[in-house]
Amino acid sequence: MNMMTMKCDEVRLLLVSFADGALAGARAEAVRAHVAGCAACREELAQLAADAELLRREEKPEVPAYLGTRITAVIRERQAGARPWYGLSQVMARIAAVVLVAVGVWLGTALARGMVGPQQSLTDRLAQLGIELQNGEDK
């Protein structure tokens, strides 16, 4: 962004900082130069300054002394109420993990023993044992 030829949309992004005095150096000078020659940005800056002054004059509400203590107490109550569910979910997660491990062990054992998986026909099983059926039919 060229500081000497700033456009209105670039200046508008910096107007709040400029109005607060938070903008310094070349940026502040570029905004100042632009505002001097641009009625629309000058009007927006004037409105920002008026809004800031209005906010400064506004009475600030008095905060009761007990408010901080009460907020802290409510937060603690809610946290205490949430803990049993948190603990329960941990227990459920552990149970699920144990069940998954047990099923995995059982399935691995069953696959290794041939108890689960593609089923062989009775003829093929008997042939493995050396027994041949006479008609070649499964019985």
Image (cartoon, rainbow, N blue to C red):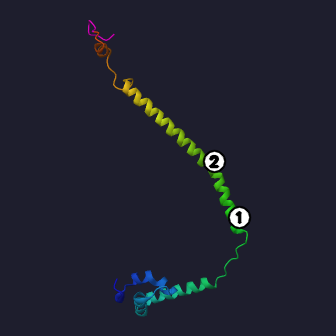
* Location of residue 76 by image quarter: bottom right
In this view, the residue in front, 129 or 36, is: 129
Q: Amino acid at mark 1?
A: Arg
Taking the image as shown, residue 17 lies to the left or right of residue 3, namely right
Q: Does residue 48 lie above or below 86 as drawn?
A: below
Residue at the spot 55% in from the left edge and 41% down from the top edge = 92
For label 1, the residue is: 70
Mark 1 crowdedness (10 Å alpha carbons): few <14, some 14-19, many ≥20? few
Q: Position of residue 113 (x, y in %)?
A: 38, 24
Distance CA(mark 2)–CA(mark 1):
23 Å
Q: Quadrant of residue 11?
A: bottom left
Sequence-wise, the earlier of marks 2 and 1 is 1
Question: Relative to the observer, which residue lies in front, 118 or 110?
Answer: 110
Q: Is residue 38 left or right of residue 125?
A: right
**Magenta stretch bounds:** 132-139
Residue at 73%, 72% (x, y): give it.
Answer: 65
